[in-house]
Structure formats: structure tokens, C-alpha cells
């Protein structure tokens, strides 16, 4: 398995792990970027009091899905500080996932909002806009990948 195929497999696994978790992001652009990965349970933390964030998490966690929290603030100084703060503070209330480092490894991001269709297509090796977004849902990635490499599903 070559490097690009390993990254694709890592992306598939990451998407599968993220889709049912509660994801904390900084702002609107980050929220839109994370939605590209199929995440639906997203809480924006920018300019909110911690109590408000906890109430939003409590409201969201009552719906189906994994109640583990993934903190996907930016990987700059401010984002790291925010991630450390929320990780320490929320740890006493919720389970905190360590998927944050995987997102940075796979995508090589500094800001979460840099995650866009083009970046995902480049990671996948498709510059023609086909494949991942043909179905408008990234979690169909395995089926699409099998078609690219000629495997039957």
C-alpha cells in the first residue's frame, strides 16, 4: 500500500469515527468545514461562555450518537490554548477524544477552515471533482474508492 492509499484509508477511518461524535469548533467557517466530513453534531465555542457551551453539548448529546467530544479548534497558538482549556474543563463532565491529532496529521492543517472540497479531493488524488462529492456525502468514500481501483463492492 503506497502513501496516498494509506492516507485515504486513514481518512476513511477518521470520517467514520467523527461522524457520530460531538465536535467543538471555533467559528462558522470551521463548522462548515467539519460538516464536509459528515459531522452533524457540532458546537461553536467562539465568543461563548463555558456554561453556554456545556448547555449546548448537553442538548446535543440527548440525540443519537456517540457522546464523546472531539475538540477541533485551529492548530495555531490561540486554537491550541482553547483546545487545552476545553479539554481540561470538560474532562470532568464528558469523555474527550484524542482524534484532534489525527486530523492535523492527515490534513496538515493550521486552521480547520482550510479543510475544503479541494483539499479532500487533492488528498484523494482526484482533481476533476468526481468521486467523493458525487454522492454529496463523504462517508460513501469506501465504496467510491473501491470503484476507483476496480474492486467489486
Image: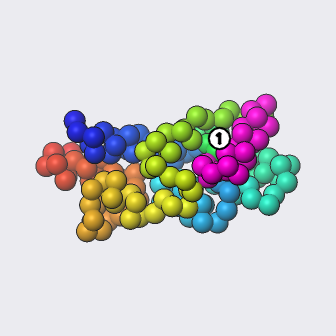
Out of 119 and 65, give the one closest to the viewer. 119
Residue occupying image coordinates x 34% and y 53%: 123
* Dominant SS type (magenta): helix
Furthest-bottom residue in this view: 128
Q: Which residues are magenta?
A: 72-92
Q: Is residue 1 above or below residue 108?
A: above
Furthest-left residue in this view: 150
For label 1, the crowd category at 10 Å Cα-Cα, with few meaning under 14, some 14 to 19 and many 20 or more, is many
Q: Is residue 98 above or below residue 77?
A: above
- Residue 102 visible? The answer is yes
Q: Quadrant of the N terminus?
A: top left
Q: Position of residue 120 (x, y in %)?
A: 38, 57
State the colouring used for the structure image: rainbow
Residue occupying image coordinates x 40% and y 51%: 139
Residue occupying image coordinates x 83% and y 49%: 50
Residue occupying image coordinates x 76% and y 34%: 88
Residue 86 in the magenta stretch? The answer is: yes
Judge left or right: residue 90 versus residue 71. right
Residue 39 in the magenta stretch? The answer is: no
The residue identified by callout 1 is 69
Q: Is residue 46 above or below residue 1?
A: below
Q: Quadrant of the C terminus?
A: top left
Amino acid at each position: 500500500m503506497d502513501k496516498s492509499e494509506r492516507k485515504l484509508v486513514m481518512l476513511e477511518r477518521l470520517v467514520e469515527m467523527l461522524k457520530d461524535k460531538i465536535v467543538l469548533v471555533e467559528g462558522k467557517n470551521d463548522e462548515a468545514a467539519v460538516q464536509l466530513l459528515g459531522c452533524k453534531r457540532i458546537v461553536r465555542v467562539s465568543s461563548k461562555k463555558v456554561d453556554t457551551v456545556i448547555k449546548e453539548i448537553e442538548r446535543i448529546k440527548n440525540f443519537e450518537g456517540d457522546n464523546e467530544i472531539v475538540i477541533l479548534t485551529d492548530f495555531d497558538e490561540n486554537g491550541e490554548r482553547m483546545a487545552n482549556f476545553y479539554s481540561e474543563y470538560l474532562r470532568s463532565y464528558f469523555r474527550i477524544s484524542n482524534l484532534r491529532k489525527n486530523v492535523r496529521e492527515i490534513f496538515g492543517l493550521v486552521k480547520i477552515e482550510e479543510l475544503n472540497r479541494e483539499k479532500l479531493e487533492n488528498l484523494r488524488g482526484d482533481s476533476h471533482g468526481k468521486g467523493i462529492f458525487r454522492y454529496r456525502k463523504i462517508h460513501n468514500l469506501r465504496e467510491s474508492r473501491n470503484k476507483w481501483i476496480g474492486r467489486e463492492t
